Image (spheres, helix red, strand yellow):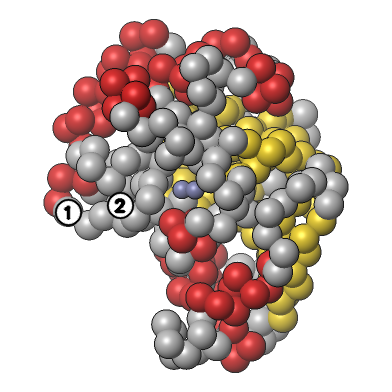
């Protein structure tokens, strides 16, 4: 399995010069299974480059799955710019897996952001065939991989994903707030993963003044990784106020405590 980060920024894209090492695009992750088939997690602004790369690589797959952690703006805003969605031969399955989702109209979310007031092309004119799958279940088989979800603490709700393919596992926990100590059910969900992608938008000091904003600190991401015994940790969803110098310093500090930890950079690919 291969995991490639096309968006590592939280909340809003940034394009300032000193943000480009870690990346300015918001969350979108390409998951390539061992048989070569591709799934996507989230459609932040990074999905534009992801779609371009799929086309440049001569995408043969007629059906794509995009799974969503949740539908905050920074996780859906790239969707209108996802080139494969304009291909009439393409089937795109948009899925929201998990019990107790607070959304009631999955299609309406995508339709809404492409209304004439906001965007010149309506959803129904994009070209691809879309299937909107809001599934009240916690496990789904996609191609040869198993996708499992867990509900996370985040305003409006968000879901963490665990993907198992050919005896390798990746867990993606973004947009999650733990509280005073890391949540035991999240640690359990991440247990022994080959890769944990965990968000950390804040330092421990910053977290104090951002209680209720729905995010984690670097220390908490590491604590989950340590307690769950994961092989590698990639920290993502960087705060739009944290520039490259700041994040590079944080990464060095994190690696002192957890050597197999990196701060995710745009276009970084991790092979499991
Ligand atoms: Zn977010
Ligand atoms: Zn969010």
- Mark 2 or mark 1: whose residue is earlier in sequence: 1
Residue drawn at point x = 56 percent, y = 58 percent:
71
Q: Is residue 85 visible?
A: no
| Contact? badges 2 and 1 (CB < 8 Å) | yes
Identify which residue, 231 or 44, lies in the foreground.
44
Picture quadrant where residue 2 is located:
top right
Q: As displayed, is residue 170 above or below residue 65? A: above
Question: Is the distance from the Cβ of mark 2 to the nearest ligand 1 atom less than 8 Å?
Answer: no
Rate crowding at label 2 as few (under 14), some (14 to 19) or many (20 or more) other CA atoms within 10 Å: many
Identify which residue, 247 or 195, lies in the foreground.
247
Rendering coords of residue 43 (x, y %): 52, 60
Q: Secondary structure at mark 2?
A: loop
Q: As displayed, is residue 100 above or below residue 187? A: below
Identify which residue, 196 or 180, lies in the foreground.
180
Rate crowding at label 1 as few (under 14), some (14 to 19) or many (20 or more) other CA atoms within 10 Å: few
Task: Work out how far the residue at label 2 is from the one at label 1, CA to CA, in angstroms.
Answer: 8 Å
What residue is shown with label 2? 24
Q: As displayed, is residue 257 above or below residue 225? A: above
Question: Is the distance from the Cβ of mark 1 to the nearest ligand 1 atom less than 8 Å?
Answer: no
Picture quadrant where residue 229 is located:
top right
Residue drawn at point x = 53 percent, y = 15 percent:
181
Task: Please identify the quadrant where the C terminus is shown.
Answer: top right
Rendering coords of residue 85 (x, y %): 59, 77
What residue is shown with label 1? 16
Task: Please identify the quadrant where the N terminus is shown.
Answer: top right
For residue 69, side relative to residue 10 (left or right): right
Q: Secondary structure at mark 1?
A: loop
Residue drawn at point x = 61 percent, y = 45 percent:
158
């Amino acid at each position: 399995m291969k995991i490639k980060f096309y968006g590592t920024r939280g909340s809003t894209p940034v394009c300032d010069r000193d943000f480009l090492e870690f990346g300015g695009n918001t969350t979108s992750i390409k998951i390539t299974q061992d048989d070569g088939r591709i799934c996507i997690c989230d459609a932040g602004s990074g999905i534009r480059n992801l779609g371009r790369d799929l086309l440049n690589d001569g995408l043969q797959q007629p059906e794509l799955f995009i799974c969503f952690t949740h539908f905050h703006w920074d996780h859906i805003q790239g969707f209108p710019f996802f080139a494969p969605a304009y291909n009439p031969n393409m089937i795109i399955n948009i899925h929201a897996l998990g019990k107790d989702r607070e959304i009631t109209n999955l299609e309406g979310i995508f339709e809404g952001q492409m209304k004439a007031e906001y965007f010149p092309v309506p959803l129904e004119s994009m070209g691809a065939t879309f299937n909107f799958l809001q599934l009240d279940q916690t496990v789904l088989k996609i191609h040869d991989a198993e996708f499992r979800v867990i509900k996370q603490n985040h305003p409006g709700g968000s879901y963490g994903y665990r993907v198992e393919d050919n005896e390798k596992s990746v867990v993606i926990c973004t947009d999650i707030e733990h509280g005073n100590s890391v949540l035991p059910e999240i640690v359990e969900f991440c247990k022994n993963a080959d890769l944990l992608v965990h968000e950390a938008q804040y330092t421990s000091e910053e977290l104090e003044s951002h209680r209720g904003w729905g995010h984690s600190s670097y220390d908490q991401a590491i604590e989950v990784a340590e307690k769950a015994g994961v092989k590698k940790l990639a920290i993502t969803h960087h705060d739009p106020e944290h520039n490259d110098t700041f994040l590079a310093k944080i990464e060095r500090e994190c690696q002192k405590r957890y050597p197999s930890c990196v701060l995710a950079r745009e276009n970084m690919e991790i092979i499991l």
